[in-house]
Image (cartoon, helix red, strand yellow):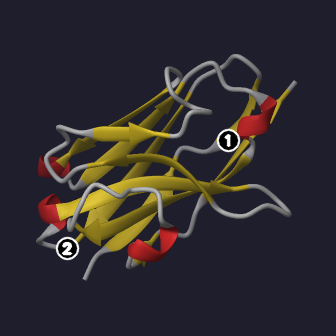
Amino acid sequence: QVQLVESGGGLVQAGASLRLSCAASGRTFSSYAMAWFRQAPGKEREFVAGITWGGTSTDYADSVKGRFTFSRDNAKNAVYLQMNSLKPEDTAAYYCAARRYDGPDYRTPGRYAYWGQGTQVTVSS
Protein backbone atom coordinates (compact mmCIF):
# COMPACT_ATOMS: atom_id res chain seq x y z
CA GLN A 1 0.00 0.00 0.00
CA VAL A 2 1.29 3.45 -0.91
CA GLN A 3 -0.08 6.79 0.19
CA LEU A 4 0.90 9.96 -1.65
CA VAL A 5 0.77 13.59 -0.53
CA GLU A 6 1.65 16.42 -2.91
CA SER A 7 2.79 19.90 -1.98
CA GLY A 8 4.42 22.93 -3.52
CA GLY A 9 1.72 24.29 -5.77
CA GLY A 10 0.83 27.95 -5.89
CA LEU A 11 0.14 31.05 -7.94
CA VAL A 12 3.04 32.38 -10.00
CA GLN A 13 3.61 34.60 -13.01
CA ALA A 14 4.56 33.29 -16.40
CA GLY A 15 8.27 32.51 -16.58
CA ALA A 16 8.56 31.65 -12.91
CA SER A 17 9.52 28.32 -11.35
CA LEU A 18 7.89 25.98 -8.88
CA ARG A 19 8.98 22.73 -7.32
CA LEU A 20 6.32 20.17 -6.54
CA SER A 21 6.98 17.46 -3.99
CA CYS A 22 5.24 14.16 -3.44
CA ALA A 23 5.82 12.34 -0.17
CA ALA A 24 5.12 8.63 -0.22
CA SER A 25 4.48 6.21 2.60
CA GLY A 26 5.02 2.51 2.23
CA ARG A 27 8.00 0.25 2.69
CA THR A 28 8.23 -0.73 -0.98
CA PHE A 29 8.26 2.79 -2.41
CA SER A 30 11.57 2.22 -4.12
CA SER A 31 10.10 -0.52 -6.30
CA TYR A 32 7.36 1.70 -7.71
CA ALA A 33 7.32 3.68 -10.89
CA MET A 34 6.08 7.21 -10.33
CA ALA A 35 4.43 9.82 -12.49
CA TRP A 36 2.93 13.27 -12.48
CA PHE A 37 -0.33 13.98 -14.22
CA ARG A 38 -2.29 17.21 -14.43
CA GLN A 39 -5.86 18.16 -15.03
CA ALA A 40 -7.20 21.55 -16.00
CA PRO A 41 -10.90 22.46 -15.59
CA GLY A 42 -12.99 20.89 -18.31
CA LYS A 43 -10.11 18.82 -19.64
CA GLU A 44 -9.02 15.23 -19.27
CA ARG A 45 -6.19 14.24 -16.99
CA GLU A 46 -2.96 14.31 -18.95
CA PHE A 47 0.45 12.81 -18.48
CA VAL A 48 3.27 15.16 -17.49
CA ALA A 49 6.28 13.03 -16.54
CA GLY A 50 7.25 9.54 -15.39
CA ILE A 51 10.26 7.97 -13.72
CA THR A 52 11.51 4.45 -13.10
CA TRP A 53 11.90 3.04 -9.63
CA GLY A 54 15.64 3.70 -9.75
CA GLY A 55 15.31 7.14 -11.27
CA THR A 56 17.52 6.15 -14.18
CA SER A 57 14.92 6.64 -16.85
CA THR A 58 12.39 9.41 -17.33
CA ASP A 59 9.66 10.25 -19.78
CA TYR A 60 8.15 13.68 -20.41
CA ALA A 61 5.20 15.00 -22.30
CA ASP A 62 6.29 17.07 -25.27
CA SER A 63 4.60 20.12 -23.77
CA VAL A 64 6.94 20.15 -20.76
CA LYS A 65 10.12 18.63 -22.17
CA GLY A 66 13.10 20.89 -21.53
CA ARG A 67 11.23 22.89 -18.87
CA PHE A 68 10.29 20.29 -16.25
CA THR A 69 12.60 17.86 -14.44
CA PHE A 70 11.38 14.81 -12.57
CA SER A 71 13.57 13.33 -9.84
CA ARG A 72 13.21 10.96 -6.93
CA ASP A 73 14.92 10.32 -3.62
CA ASN A 74 14.10 6.80 -2.47
CA ALA A 75 15.89 7.37 0.83
CA LYS A 76 13.38 10.12 1.59
CA ASN A 77 10.44 8.36 -0.04
CA ALA A 78 9.84 11.41 -2.19
CA VAL A 79 9.66 12.55 -5.77
CA TYR A 80 9.98 16.06 -7.11
CA LEU A 81 8.89 17.95 -10.18
CA GLN A 82 10.97 21.02 -10.89
CA MET A 83 8.98 23.27 -13.18
CA ASN A 84 10.79 26.13 -14.91
CA SER A 85 9.65 28.71 -17.45
CA LEU A 86 6.05 28.17 -16.47
CA LYS A 87 3.33 29.14 -18.93
CA PRO A 88 -0.35 29.95 -18.40
CA GLU A 89 -1.21 26.68 -20.15
CA ASP A 90 0.55 24.82 -17.33
CA THR A 91 -2.27 25.88 -15.02
CA ALA A 92 -3.87 22.73 -13.60
CA ALA A 93 -4.19 20.50 -10.59
CA TYR A 94 -1.10 18.31 -10.47
CA TYR A 95 -1.33 14.73 -9.23
CA CYS A 96 1.36 12.33 -8.14
CA ALA A 97 0.77 8.66 -9.03
CA ALA A 98 2.47 5.36 -8.26
CA ARG A 99 2.36 1.82 -9.59
CA ARG A 100 4.42 -1.32 -9.27
CA TYR A 101 6.89 -1.19 -12.11
CA ASP A 102 5.80 -3.53 -14.89
CA GLY A 103 7.12 -1.75 -17.94
CA PRO A 104 7.99 1.68 -19.33
CA ASP A 105 4.48 2.87 -20.19
CA TYR A 106 4.14 5.87 -17.90
CA ARG A 107 1.44 7.67 -19.83
CA THR A 108 -1.71 5.65 -19.14
CA PRO A 109 -3.50 6.87 -16.00
CA GLY A 110 -5.36 3.57 -15.57
CA ARG A 111 -2.10 1.75 -14.88
CA TYR A 112 -1.58 3.64 -11.63
CA ALA A 113 -3.06 2.17 -8.48
CA TYR A 114 -2.20 5.03 -6.14
CA TRP A 115 -2.91 8.74 -6.44
CA GLY A 116 -2.38 11.80 -4.31
CA GLN A 117 -5.01 14.43 -3.63
CA GLY A 118 -3.47 16.96 -6.00
CA THR A 119 -1.89 20.38 -5.68
CA GLN A 120 -3.00 23.41 -7.67
CA VAL A 121 -0.63 25.28 -9.94
CA THR A 122 -1.84 28.56 -11.39
CA VAL A 123 0.28 30.56 -13.81
CA SER A 124 -0.81 34.08 -14.63
CA SER A 125 0.13 35.86 -17.83
The CA distance from mark 2 to mark 1 is 27 Å
Q: Residue at x 14, y 59 (%)?
A: 30
Relative image position of residue 58 (x, y in whole percent)? 31, 39
Relative image position of residue 122 (x, y in whole percent)? 76, 41
Q: Nearer the viewer, residue 12 or 69?
A: 69
Q: Residue at x 88, y 24 (%)?
A: 125
Question: What is the quadrant of the N terminus in the image?
Answer: bottom left
Relative image position of residue 51 (x, y in whole percent)? 30, 47
Three-letter residue code for mark 2: Gly
Where disc 2 sits, the SS reads: loop
Classify residue 104 by image quadrant: bottom left
Three-letter residue code for mark 1: Gly
Where disc 1 sits, the SS reads: strand
Q: Nearer the viewer, residue 57 or 23?
A: 57
Using a 10 Å C-alpha cutoff, classify the residue at mark 2 as few (fewer than 14 neighbours), some (14 to 19) or many (20 or more).
few
Residue with the mark numbered 1: 10
Which numbered circle lies on residue 26?
2
